[in-house]
Every structure is written in C-alpha cells, then in structure tokens.
Amino acid sequence: MISLALPKGSLERRALELFAAAGLPVRRRSERSYRGTVDHTGVSHVAFYKPREIPLVVGDGTFDLGLTGADWVEETGAEVEVVESFDYSRNTERPWRLVLAVPSGHPARSAADLDDGVRVATEYPNIGRRFFREAGRRAEVIVSYGATEAKIPELADAMMDVVETGHSLRQNDLRVIETVRTCGAQLVANPAAYADPARRGVIRNVALLLRAAWVGPAHVLLTVRAPADRLAEVVPAMPGQSWRAGPGLADATMVVLQGVLPRRDVPETIDALLSAGAVNVTESGIGIFATGEAG
Ligand SMILES: Nc1ncnc2c1ncn2[C@@H]1O[C@H](COP(=O)(O)OP(=O)(O)OP(=O)(O)O)[C@@H](O)[C@H]1O
Ligand SMILES: O=P(O)(O)OC[C@H]1O[C@H](OP(=O)(O)OP(=O)(O)O)[C@H](O)[C@@H]1O
C-alpha cells in the first residue's frame, strides 16, 4: 500500500480531474477536508498539502507519492524520483513559466541589462540565486510570500514569478525579460518506496493510469504518407516521438510514418508536413502511449 499527497490550491482542480479521468476518483467529505481516499486497492490514504510542501513530505518518506509543481521540486531540492510529468497549469493545457519581469517602462531587455545589486522579489529564492549566479549578475533576492507583483517598486526592482496567461503581469504593468524555467505538474515518489518492489508496482500502475488519462485526450497519432525521395525534408517536420511504420501498400515508392504529438500542435505540424512534401496526413485518437526504458 502507498500513501498519496495531492496539491491543495492552484493545482488542485486539475489534479482531481486527472485522477477522476484515470478512473481513480478521489473521495473526501468536502472541499475543505484535507483527508481522503482514492479508488485503488494499492493506495491507503490521500492527504492534501500545499504544492511547495509536497516534495519535502515525499522526500522524507511521510508520503510515498505526491503530485506537485516542477518549480517546487527544484526549489526545495528534495530527494524524490520524478515518475511522470504533465504539462498543464492552473487554467490551461500548457506548461507554465517561471519568469523574470520588470516594470513595463524599464529599459532592460535581459538579465544582463540589470544593475548589480538589483532587488528581485520571488517565492523561489534558491532558483533565483542560482539563476543570477549562472547569469553572472549580483542580485539581492527578496523572499516573497505571494502577491509578488505588489513588491515593485517599494521592496523590489524586478520579480521572478509564475506566469500562465500573463493576466497578472498586464494588470501590474510588468514585462517579461527572461524565461527562467518552463514547468509542469510532476508525480514524484519517495526513493525508498520506489525501490521497494511492492510499492513500486502500485506507483507504476497509478502513473500509467494517469498517463493514459492525460495523453489520450491531449495527444493524437499522425499517420503520414510521403514519397521516399522526400523523406529528408519530411522527417524533420515529424513530431519528436516518431517512427517509420513501413512502405506504402499499393505504391512502394511511398513511405508511411507515424508520430505522437500534443493535440494543440496539430495544425502547424500538418502544414509543415504538407509543405515538406507529405502526400497526406491522417489524425487519430490514442489511448495509452507507454514508453519503455529503451524509448
Ligand atoms: N497560474 C498559476 N498561478 C499560480 N501557480 C500556478 C499556476 N499554474 C501552475 N501553478 C503552480 O501551482 C503551484 C502552486 O503552489 P503553491 O505551494 O504556491 O500553492 P498555491 O496555494 O496553490 O499557490 P498560490 O495560491 O500562491 O498560487 C506551483 O507549483 C505553481 O507553479
Ligand atoms: O499569468 P496568470 O494567469 O495571471 O497567473 C500567474 C499569477 O497567478 C499566481 O498568483 P495567485 O493568484 O496564485 O496569487 P499569489 O501571487 O499570491 O501566489 C502567480 O503568482 C501569478 O501572480
């Protein structure tokens, strides 16, 4: 049996939707109840924690498995195994970004243009300090506990914060000068639990169900017919996860390729494939897309 920590707050609704879509509905007395169960014989109990705390309580073994944000996995430096990643945010089907932003009227175009000693407000002091060290700039990192945009101009000259739709930046007259990280939700496991065959089995099983629920609706399979003598142009336009399905049936000068890609990338990928010389492209839905260790 494994214990599970789920995110309260920004990532909560999407986490519950994902578990429900995977056939693992989370049951609890009410939205204010932070304890629950999930319909899986291998999961003993569920608790709701803030995403920033989840890597820590999974890393120290309080919980075997947790769902949190990639930003907090990095910021806490917790020792966890990342089992799966899901690129959705609070409101959208896309990853979110951790960005460095300055007031709209500020002349800086990148971190290199900021003065030494620039005051940067952030909820992510470790990522912030690392970023400026690697950028070769000296910055004073001011720890923020939320509403980070408000810290400018009194407490800070710039900020490093989460951006999803960009609405908060626009409402506070701020402008992005660097994307520091692109982040998604991550399913993380305690290393000892992941090394234990019984608990690893349950963790892999939960991960596979979640992945199927996530990949199915959000991804598609493209089947592409292209002349063999245009392959050099067509192959670079194929999605990252692609393979050669075989030669054409009626016409051996044709090659059939297949690839899996996010549904949102379909229009531009089809345009690129047809421009590169593909004869036709078929889109179809997929269920599970599991990748083994060799893949
Ligand atoms: N649009 C968004 N706004 C804020 N956080 C987001 C958004 N999309 C994804 N996230 C992620 O959700 C998680 C929020 O974690 P946190 O521990 O700060 O709890 P929270 O109470 O949900 O956050 P907050 O209330 O400060 O937005 C982080 O991993 C964050 O990067
Ligand atoms: O790009 P957007 O879609 O506007 O989303 C990003 C904003 O949402 C979050 O704030 P939240 O409302 O969680 O409050 P907080 O600033 O107190 O964390 C985050 O800190 C940004 O301010």
Image (cartoon, grey):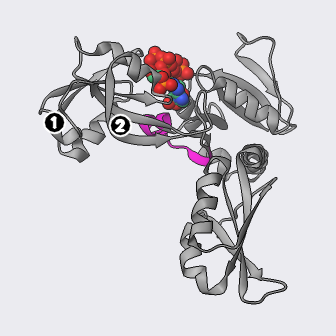
Look at mark 2 in the image and give the residue it sits on.
127
Look at mark 1 in the image and give the residue it sits on.
138
In the rendered view, does 258 fall on the left or right side of 184? right
- Relative to 68, say whether 274 is above or below: below
Instruction: Identify the image quadrant of residue 95.
Output: top right
Query: Mark 2 packing: few (<14 Cα in 10 Å), some, or many (20+)?
Result: many
In the rendered view, does 83 fall on the left or right side of 146? right
User: Does residue 147 show up magenta in the picture?
Assistant: no
Front residue of this view, candidates 23 and 97:
97
Q: CA distance from mark 1 to mark 2?
A: 14 Å
The answer, for residue 295, to whether it is visible in the render is: no
* Residue at image location 81% in from the left, 25% down from the top: 37
Residue range corresponding to the magenta coloring = 71-85
How far from the left and from the top, in percent, is residue 54?
Answer: 57, 30
* Residue at image location 60% in from the left, 19% down from the top: 9
How far from the left and from the top, in percent, is residue 268?
Answer: 58, 55
Identify the element where label 1 is drawn.
Answer: loop
In the displayed orientation, state which residue is furthest to the left. Answer: 116
How far from the left and from the top, in percent, is residue 56?
Answer: 52, 32
Inspect the image, locate mark 2, and give the three-letter code of the amino acid beneath it.
Ile
Q: Quadrant of the N terminus?
A: top right
* Residue at image location 61% in from the left, 22% down from the top: 49
In the rendered view, does 175 fall on the left or right side of 37? left
